[in-house]
């Protein structure tokens, strides 16, 4: 785990509440302190050390060392699991790489389904850019063909931009791709302006998710859904990441009120995002309790 992320987590109130001010932490602290004191007693018993010559603050030193050991063993976590009340559903929030997770993966894209990473319409470092380089580096036409097939019969409007595609589809439009034994959902989540700069609001992201859930209910599988922090990167949503996580989870649970289309939602936060924007999973757990049943 990145040391900067670890330090930022330790400084939060939630870390101290969940990691340290717990019964398990207290037991560990007393066990470590007791072990140190027992060692001192044994050394004194065999006359290897004269306790009377020790500084008066020796006990405080032992307390401090014991506390440090507890902190080291209760380091900030990289994954939390929330059980949805009254349902056979769980929400997992973890720091990692979406491509390393097992499940149906969501790839956020734009409403014109532009794919060109060579000219910079799509940033190579974006999630869509990473997907494209991983699976279609040598065959962009195959990717566009999959998208076109998935969009057949769907409504669109003609939208003029400086470059790129000119068919604009509604937010939430979803295209399914089955590649190398994996299922991906390309989700239209952001709009490109005339200069091909992407932009979204939190409400637009939530509207897009409504379309995604409807699509998965109709044409998806009942496997875990792997969801990145859609909208927070090139989508430029200004809401703090931890609140976005809570709202994504809330959208999933609300869509599942009448139809459980997946038993697990995995929300993945990239490590660089977690560090740069101070995403602390103890604080995320607090928000999930506030937003979810």
Image (cartoon, helix red, strand yellow):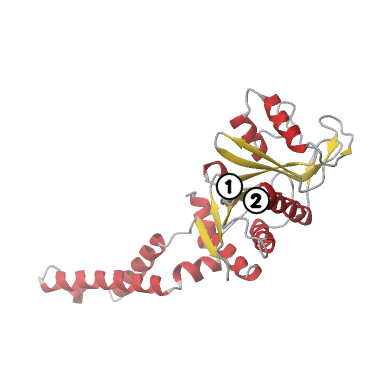
Residue 270 is marked as 1
Q: Is residue 79 left or right of residue 172?
A: left
Residue 278 is marked as none
Q: Is residue 76 above or below residue 270?
A: below
Q: Nearer the viewer, residue 109 or 150?
A: 150
Q: Position of residue 260 (x, y in %)?
A: 62, 60
Viewer-side label of 2, 1? 2
Q: Position of residue 144 (x, y in %)?
A: 72, 29
Q: Residue at x 48, y 51 (%)?
A: 3
Q: Residues within 10 Å of mark 2 (few under 14, many from 20)?
A: some
Q: Position of residue 15 (x, y in %)?
A: 51, 65
Q: Residue furthest left?
A: 46
Q: Position of residue 184 (x, y in %)?
A: 63, 41
SS for callout 2: loop
SS for callout 1: loop
Pick whichever of labels 2 and 1 is earlier in the sequence.
2
Q: Residue at x 24, y 73 (%)?
A: 37
The quadrant in which residue 85 appears is bottom right
Q: Nearer the viewer, residue 213 or 138?
A: 213
Q: Residue at x 58, y 71 (%)?
A: 86
Q: Which quarter of the rendered picture does the C terminus lie within? A: bottom right
- The Cα atoms of the two marked residues, 2 and 1, are separated by 9 Å
Q: Is residue 61 above or below residue 265?
A: below
Q: Residue at x 38, y 61 (%)?
A: 73
Residues tagged 2 and 1 counted as in contact (Cβ below 8 A)? yes
Q: Is residue 51 left or right of residue 113?
A: left
The quadrant in which residue 292 appears is bottom right
Residue beneath disc 2: 229
């Amino acid at each position: 785990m990145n040391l900067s992320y670890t330090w930022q987590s330790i400084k939060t109130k939630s870390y101290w509440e969940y990691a340290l001010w717990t019964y398990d932490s207290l037991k560990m602290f007393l066990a470590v302190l007791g072990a140190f004191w027992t060692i001192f007693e044994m050394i004194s018993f065999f006359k290897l050390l004269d306790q009377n010559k020790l500084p008066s603050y020796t006990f405080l030193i032992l307390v401090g060392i014991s506390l440090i050991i507890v902190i080291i063993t209760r380091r900030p976590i990289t994954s939390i699991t929330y059980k949805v009340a009254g349902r056979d559903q769980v929400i997992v929030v973890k720091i990692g790489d979406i491509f390393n997770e097992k499940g149906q993966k969501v790839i956020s894209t734009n409403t014109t389904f532009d794919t060109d990473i060579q000219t910079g319409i799509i940033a190579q470092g974006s999630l869509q850019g990473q997907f494209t380089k991983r699976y279609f580096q040598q065959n962009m036409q195959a990717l566009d063909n999959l998208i076109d097939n998935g969009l057949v019969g769907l409504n669109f409007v003609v939208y003029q931009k400086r470059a790129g595609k000119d068919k604009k589809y509604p937010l939430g439009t979803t295209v399914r791709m089955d590649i190398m034994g994996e299922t991906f959902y390309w989700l239209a989540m952001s709009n490109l302006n005339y200069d091909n700069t992407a932009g979204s609001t939190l409400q637009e992201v939530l509207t897009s998710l409504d379309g995604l859930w409807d699509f998965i209910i109709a044409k998806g599988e009942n496997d875990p859904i792997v969801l990145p922090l859609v909208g927070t990167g090139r989508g430029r949503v200004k809401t703090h990441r931890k609140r976005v996580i809570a709202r994504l989870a809330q959208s999933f649970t609300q869509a599942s009120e009448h139809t459980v289309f997946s038993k697990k939602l995995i929300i993945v936060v990239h490590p660089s995002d977690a560090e740069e924007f101070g995403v602390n999973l103890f604080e995320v757990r607090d928000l999930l309790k506030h937003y979810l049943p």
